[in-house]
Structures are given as structure tokens and as C-alpha cells.
Amino acid sequence: METVYLETTIVSYLVAYPGRDLIVSAHQQITREWWEMARNRFKLFISEAVLEEIGAGDLKASARRRKVVQGLPILELNKDVRELVHNYERFLGLPKRARADLVHISFAVSYEMDYLLTWNCSHMMNS
């Protein structure tokens, strides 16, 4: 079974109240449809970084986010992930605001995930 690393935006969009912004609302709908139709075709993973990020903010929203990922395997922030983040920072020359994106990409690469599912890694997509 192919593996998928779920970045924080997927979890957030999955349980968020409908957004007023048309693009955000579309992302939410696509995410929910993917979750219902496709998630069972993959082995899903999150990381310690995702757990930390979904725990922030509004307590009720945070509880909904934690509930949806309950039972998913959690990838550990290990030496290999840290080294990848460091190397990506050094060699890619991305802006500081892209650091969180690098952490998620490093998890996916280090753990040899088949896919990284996100709405938020635009820094990497546009490099």
C-alpha cells in the first residue's frame, strides 16, 4: 500500500468550518472529498510537527483536528529529518517563512513516503 504524509493544512481543512474565501472553501471541499473517497487506498502518516501545529489555536478546533488524526502513525523528529531541514535551508535559499514547509518535506523524504499531501508548500512548488 502506498504511503501518504499528511501535512497540517490537510488536517485543518478537513475539520474547519466552511471558509468565506472562495479558494479556501474549495480546498476544504476537495480535502473532504479526498478523505471520503481516497484515504482508504493509502497508509496515512502524520509527524510530531503536525501534532504540534494542530494543537495550537482555538481549543475546540484543536480538539477536532486531534480527533481526526487519532490512531494514525506518528513519524518521529529524528536526526535524519533534522539534517535534511538543515541542508534544504542551506542549499535552497528559501525565505524564513518556508521553514515549516521544509520540516514537512524533510519528514516525507526521510521516511520515504510515496506522497506528501498539502495545500501549503507553495515555496517548494514555485522554486
Image (cartoon, rainbow, N blue to C red):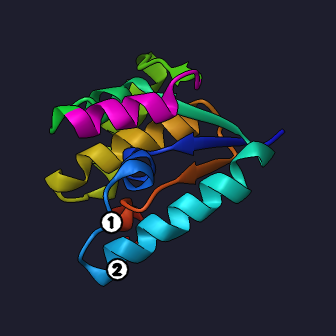
Residue 113 vertical position relative to residue 76 in the rendered view, above or below:
below
| Horizontal and vertical percent position of residue 31 | 52, 61
The residue that mark 2 highlights is: 23
The magenta segment is 60-72
Q: Secondary structure at mark 1?
A: loop
Picture disc at residue 4 = none
On the picture, is 98 further left or further right than 24?
left
Binning the other alpha carbons within 10 Å of mark 1 as few (below 14), some (14 to 19) or many (20 upward) gives: some
The residue at the point 39 percent across, 56 percent down is 13
Considering the image in quadrants, where does the N terminus appear?
top right
Q: Amino acid at mark 1?
A: Pro
| Horizontal and vertical percent position of residue 94 | 25, 59
| Horizontal and vertical percent position of residue 2 | 78, 43
The answer, for residue 126, to whether it is visible in the render is: no
For this rendering, which residue is in front, 74 or 106? 74
Query: Does residue 63 show up magenta in the picture?
Result: yes
Q: Nearer the viewer, mark 1 or mark 2?
A: 1
The residue that mark 1 highlights is: 18
For this rendering, which residue is in front, 39 or 89? 39
Earlier sequence position, callout 1 versus callout 2: 1
Residue 29 vertical position relative to residue 86 in the rendered view, above or below:
below
The residue at the point 31 percent across, 58 percent down is 17
Q: Main secondary structure of the magenta part?
A: helix
On the picture, is 55 further left or further right than 7?
left
Query: Does residue 68 show up magenta in the picture?
Result: yes
User: Distance from label 1 to label 2 (Cα)?
Assistant: 11 Å
Q: Amino acid at mark 2?
A: Ile
| Image quarter of residue 103 | top left
